Amino acid sequence: MPSGVELIQSLVNGLGVGLIYGLIAIGFSVIYNASGIVNFAQGVFVMLGGMFAHTILTRYGLPMWLSAILSTILVAAAGVLVQIFVINPMWRRNAPLFAIILATLAVQLLIEQIVILTLGDQPRTYPEFTAGGPLKIGAIAIPYQLFWILGCGAVMVFALTQFFERTRMGRALRACAQNREAAALLGIPVERMLVVAFALSAGLGGVAGILITPTQYTAYLIGTPFGINGFIAAIIGGFGSPVAGLVGGIFLGVIQSEAIVFFGAGFKNIVSLTLLLIVLLFFPKGLFGGFQKKT
Amino acid sequence: MTSPAITSAKPAKFASRFDRFQVGLLGLAALAVAGTLVYGGYLLTVMQLAMIYGVFCIGLNFFMGYTGQASFGQNAFACIGGYGSAILCVQYGWEPILALVASMAIAGVFALIIGYPTLRLRGHYLAMATFSLGLITYDITIQWTAVTQGYMGYAGIPPLGIGSFTIDSERWKLVALALLLGFGFWLSLRMRDSRFGRGLRAISGSENGAAALGVRVPRFKLIAFIIAALYASAAGSLFAHTVGFISPEVYGPQMAVMTFTMLFVGGVGTIVGPIIGAVVTSLLQEVVRGSGHFQDIAYAVVLLATLIYAPKGLSALGALFRRKKEA
Amino acid sequence: MALLRTTELTKRFDGLVANNAIDLEVPEGSLFAVIGPNGAGKTTFFSMVSGFLSSTSGSIEFNGRDITRVPQHEIAAMGLVRTFQLVQLFKGMSVAENVEVGCHLATRGGVAASLFRPAWFRKQEREVRERAHELLEFVGLSAQADLDAELLPYGQQRLLEVARAMAAKPKLLLLDEPAAGLNTQETEGLAHIIQKINAQGTTVLLIEHDVALVTRIAHRIAVLDFGRKIAEGTPDEIKAHPEVIAAYLGVEEASNA
């Protein structure tokens, strides 16, 4: 039986990972709400974030903050490319849902293999943003990176909320989410909005990847587990507001990290996938019912 | 109602069964097999795998093509078939044929248990649930080392055969696999062109319309799912017995993407699509022979190009030409 | 004798009453029509009767049996078959195959039968093809039998849906706005076919927007407005009913003017 300290420690770990899942979940819902598409390649952006940041840091020796900003921009650009070259042609043609899902899966495989060929298949990591640490409270260790994740997560969610409510572009995106035809009639350039959605969503994933890499590692294959976990978080949060996505992520992160304590790390993905199946089967319309409105 | 909409004396027949174009494609595939038998060499292995994936795709086509449902996790059932065969033969010394059939039965039962709750889901949920099914199975094959031997996998799986007669030569293996593929294809045709098959295809056309005519939609979906799982399991077993070695990677997510590429290149929902797709894609793969990474990139690019520019695949090209002629 | 009887049939959606205590009796052998303005609750009523939508309260009786909570495929199996306002063709199947699907209820056999093809099954498949052919002839589509169904012009798709429903040998055929989107000539042809179907002994319940069509062919008409039945009677009675004229016909004339 695990001790109390172990449980609390895993709670702390779960909080950090959960926030990351939350950011990915928000990325899922930004695209879904604007287009009705679930981008199964979402996790690949997380991988790219960490990969780019690591490459810029080590190869060009730029400071962390600059590497982080540059990588985020690069990942957002990757998202735009995916939208323009893959999603948009299919979307225009009214391709069936599962064909689009399949295309996003193919995109994921493609990007992963390109990463292997260009950057290699070795896992890599870089130091936490703030040296020193962890912060010790009794027997519990809190890595400084967790505060960075918390801080950045809060800033992102706040900025997103402001973006959707205050800016013209944000409101246009929400209009697309509510009714695409009506938005088009109002003169909102829906396709351009989709590009914005992909850029935003990929950027979010990139930030998540940059933040999480110091606490674990990044490698070409981390996209799938992060994508799936982000999706589960999005379901729990109901594909609605950014805050709901974040809550869903934290919920999942904590459950998962407790599961590691009980079953061992090897079963981490099995546990979360099983959780996904349970959520899907017992709450087929999502926990908060936000998902079924367009399907 | 006497509007003479169709004036041609012989209306096109491409909707119901083969058109000549599809028969031609099938002939080309048979030629490719025959040519391989003559020339031999490394191509034999390529064609063997094409036959095996063809079996898998016929099953997948039942569920995704005819019934119009999405399953991104059929590789899970191939995995059950492959490991079933490997464990029963290597650990318990079963006859390969018996192991293949027994694994199919296990896969069928799993499909029933998993499909019953899962197939109530729709759209993205169904896609994600089936996708995670494939991933869970993949993770289990890696983690459950006591049974699956983890990354090591199983080696020394005996080839197919009956009693003391085993099919050892690569040429005869290909012949046997081609015959089995033909058998599976023939079975699929019989199922397709019947009351049952029409019910399935009606579901893909319109679930409501089918239900209004008394088709029991959930049950038919489940049966199609089980059929797909049986084909997948058979393909998984055939791989094990043909190659003699399996590991988790064989039945991993890459397999899902590869088989989708085959099905879509050939033409999802068409009769000959699964076979044509498997043969054409396998041969294409030889063009980009080299590192496995280049192969995966090639699959992804071909799949994307097909999805974007030719969503109906090769087998539908004939229909396309004809439609243009009529218009 | 009433083939279909609904008693106080009610459907609420989140406080909105789509159908309010509707009593209806469709006599066996009749050609019965339900009319009403858009949003009057006609399609809701239809969906409850055919089992696609569960009712909030009230009951439905078909052929002497209570079918209020019976699943749709069983209702269909009892001989109550519907068509849809938006044509639900089986894409990717030929015109003839579409009708063959209609024979689903009147036939049997599953995977095993399709694999082993015993004599009875082969005979049945032959009969299915013949029946499909007859029905296509009946609606005038036999020349298009082998065409991909989605290539049919709209008017013929409607006819195909009727033929498909008839293949199920229904006791009661529910037609949901069959003339929607048809031109005058096509509507004429359809009206003729509906009358023929009825004359051959199939009871028909028809939802329609086209009042001229309904008053010409229906034996009895019920009028819905805002989820309530406001009138019922013969076409002549309906045409003279003051409430109907106010609620529906008046509006219709005004909008047509």
Image: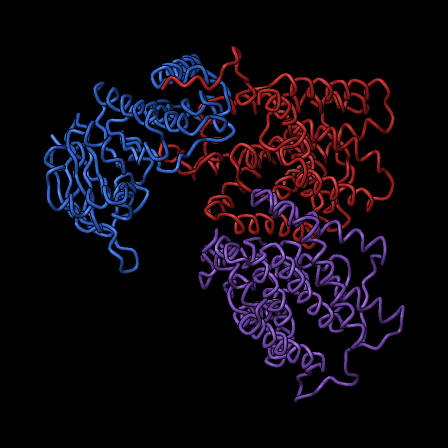
Q: Quadrant of residue C177?
A: top left
Position of residue A256 measured from the top left corner of the image (x, y, whole percent): 60, 67
**Residue name at image x 60 percent, y 52 percent:** B132
Q: Specify the colour of chain C.
A: blue
| Picture mark count | 0
Q: Quadrant of residue B181?
A: top right
**Residue name at image x 50 percent, y 44 percent:** B113
As drawn, A268 above or below A105: below
Position of residue A167 measured from the top left corner of the image (x, y, whole percent): 57, 72
**Quadrant in which the N terminus of chain A appears:** bottom right
- C176 and C81: which is toward the camera: C176
**Residue name at image x 80 percent, y 42 percent:** B295
User: Does any portion of residue C87 appear in the rendered image?
Assistant: yes
- B105 and A152: which is toward the camera: A152
Position of residue A90 measured from the top left corner of the image (x, y, whole percent): 63, 45
User: Does any portion of residue A267 appear in the rendered image?
Assistant: no
On the rendered structure, is B119 left or right of C187? right
Q: Given the current orientation, which residue lies at the most extreme top position?
A: B9
Which chain is drawn using red? B
Position of residue B204 measured from the top left corner of the image (x, y, whole percent): 49, 35
On the rendered structure, is A60 left or right of C65? right
Q: Specify the colour of chain A.
A: purple
On the rendered structure, is B177 left or right of A257? right
